[in-house]
Amino acid sequence: KAGVTQTPRYLIKTRGQQVTLSCSPISGHRSVSWYQQTPGQGLQFLFEYFSETQRNKGNFPGRFSGRQFSNSRSEMNVSTLELGDSALYLCASTLGLSGELFFGEGSRLTVL
Amino acid sequence: AQKITQTQPGMFVQEKEAVTLDCTYDTSDQSYGLFWYKQPSSGEMIFLIYQGSYDEQNATEGRYSLNFQKARKSANLVISASQLGDSAMYFCAMRELSTSGSARQLTFGSGTQLTVLP
């Protein structure tokens, strides 16, 4: 059974650009959530989607957005990148709304 | 206020010995879940063990066990017979559940870097 797949694994952008990250959940999982991990702030929740609907949103500016498609794949977008957006972005999927979260390997974003 | 507290930024353990990683949590909810994840240098968060707030028995998964003390709000991870491959960052996390069954997001602690010495 394939795990959570995130693409791209590594990327470098410059300030002001925008980026889109993709996450394919484990087959059959309908909930996808996103987390940002930085050395200073640790792991912080971005948002969670279930059946194409955003169910929870963390305390991030509107530059951070996401969506989920009918096949449960999810994308997150960050516009007008800032240096502080450099981080490991982790996607997790779960079968229902309260089960264990299974994480992907993350997308490591560097903003120059 | 911190919801998840891991007071040990770093821990060392000799190979084949047991080690306990501390975690305390804060919630006013009756229904919640506690998780431990392992993050090696590659970045992936690997699920280790889960304890529900209503579970009366401590969770165990192979060499991992969770010492759940509800009254003290602690959920320490015990790794028995440490192996070199256990060297990684370990995160304790909590997911609170509403009465309707829907869950809030996972809240993570700051992590404990475990180093297993040969």
Image: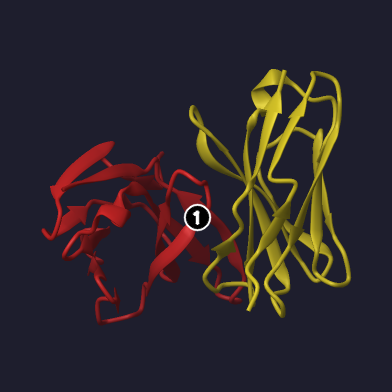
Left or right: B28 in relation to A44: left
Badge 1 sits on which subunit? B
Which quadrant: the N terminus of chain B? top left
Quick one: B105 or A112, which is closer to the camera?
A112
Question: Chain in red?
Answer: B
Quick one: B84 or B69, which is closer to the camera?
B84
Whether residue A61 is situated above or below residue B53 in the rendered picture: above
The amino acid on which the numbered mark 1 sits, given as a three-letter code, is: Met
Q: Give chain A's shade.
A: yellow
Q: In which quarter of the image is residue B5?
A: top left
| Residue, disc 1 | B45
Q: What element does badge 1 sit on?
A: loop
Image coordinates for residue A41, horizontal then vertical, percent: 51, 32
Whether residue B43 is situated above or below residue B32 in the rendered picture: above
Residue occupying the point 67% across, 57% down: A33
Q: In which quarter of the image is residue A48?
A: bottom right
